[in-house]
Image: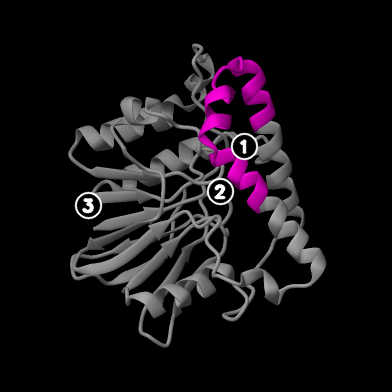
């Protein structure tokens, strides 16, 4: 089996659940029983940054890091796609766990099916903004400017010089505010003609046909078949909904709910 998970946000200061990491590790261990590959589609950590200085804070994630290392050591291929909360990895995460890190969307053939995999942030169709009122456009532009800053290699380089204690405080506070806003006012499914990732997939379909578009980021569950026969799958999350996707050897994909103890 092939498994796809996203948006665990481990370490979030906005999630009041001391067992959060333990339950996510238990889920991975359960899936590992029959997994040949696991795809983690971003924001597994609520904030992850690697500095030029020694950073002892990663000990907070030892159970999860040890679990990922055990999975890769046992022969399970683990792919890690960065999200918008864990952009700042430059080799340490891969070294500690053995995962393969992806920094951009990928077109992959999995079990005979052509798939686009990505976290999903920043993926919008061309001309997207013209469909929204001025107030919404302003919010979207603000997010895209912040995203460009976070992905800027010069900005990333200088942020690595920030002392970890300060950098982590800034990062976790930013992530906490983001999470609290979302929890207070969740943005549900917008409909086929307004959901950004669906519109993006439709535009991609005009360029080439794929079987699956699999995304995280939106914290909603969606399995939508387009007119072309392609399916857009948004995975939900692993801190509130506890959902993921499973693909069998024939390429059949379904959304699943975790059975948590």
Mark 2 neighbour class, 10 Å CA radius: few under 14, some 14 to 19, many 20 or more: many
- The foreground one among 115 and 70 is 115
> Residue beneath label 1, please?
12
Q: Which mark is residue 239?
A: 2
Boundaries of the magenta span:
144-171
Seen in the picture, residue 197 relative to 12 is either above or below; the reply is below
Seen in the picture, residue 40 relative to 193 is either above or below; the reply is above
Question: What residue is rendered at 64% in x and 31% in y?
Answer: 171
Q: CA distance from mark 1 to mark 2?
A: 10 Å
Seen in the picture, residue 156 relative to 150 is either above or below; the reply is above
Q: Are marks 2 and 3 in contact (CB under 8 Å)?
A: no
> Residue 128, image x and y in percent?
62, 71
> Residue beneath label 3, please?
34
Q: CA distance from mark 2 to mark 3?
A: 23 Å
Question: What residue is rendered at 56% in x and 64% in y?
Answer: 220
Q: State the residue lying farthest toward the right.
A: 135
> Residue 64, image x and y in percent?
41, 32
Q: Are marks 1 and 2 in contact (CB under 8 Å)?
A: yes
Q: Judging from the image, what secondary structure is the residue with disc 1 in?
A: loop
């Amino acid at each position: 089996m092939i498994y796809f998970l996203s948006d665990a946000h481990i370490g979030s200061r906005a999630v009041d659940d001391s067992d959060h990491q333990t339950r996510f590790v238990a889920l991975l261990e359960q899936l590992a029983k029959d997994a040949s590959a696991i795809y983690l589609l971003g924001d597994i950590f609520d904030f992850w940054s690697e500095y030029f200085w020694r950073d002892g804070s990663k000990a907070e994630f030892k159970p999860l890091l040890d679990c990922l290392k055990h999975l890769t050591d046992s022969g399970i291929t683990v792919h890690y796609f960065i999200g918008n909360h864990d952009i700042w990895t430059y080799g340490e995460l891969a070294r500690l766990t053995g995962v393969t890190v992806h920094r951009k969307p990928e077109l992959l053939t999995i079990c005979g099916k052509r798939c686009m995999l990505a976290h999903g942030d920043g993926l919008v169709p061309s001309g997207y903004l013209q469909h929204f009122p001025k107030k919404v456009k302003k919010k979207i532009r603000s997010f895209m400017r912040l995203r460009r800053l976070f992905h800027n290699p010069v900005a990333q380089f200088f942020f690595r010089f920030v002392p970890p204690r300060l950098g982590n405080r800034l990062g976790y506070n930013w992530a906490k505010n983001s999470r609290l806003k979302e929890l207070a006012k969740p943005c549900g499914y917008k409909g086929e003609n307004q959901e950004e990732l669906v519109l993006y997939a439709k535009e991609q379909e005009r360029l080439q046909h794929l079987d699956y578009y699999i995304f995280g980021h939106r914290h909603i569950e969606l399995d939508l078949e387009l007119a072309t026969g392609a399916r857009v799958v948004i995975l939900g999350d692993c801190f509130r909904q506890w959902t993921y996707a499973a693909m069998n050897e024939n390429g059949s994909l379904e959304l699943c709910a975790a059975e948590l103890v």
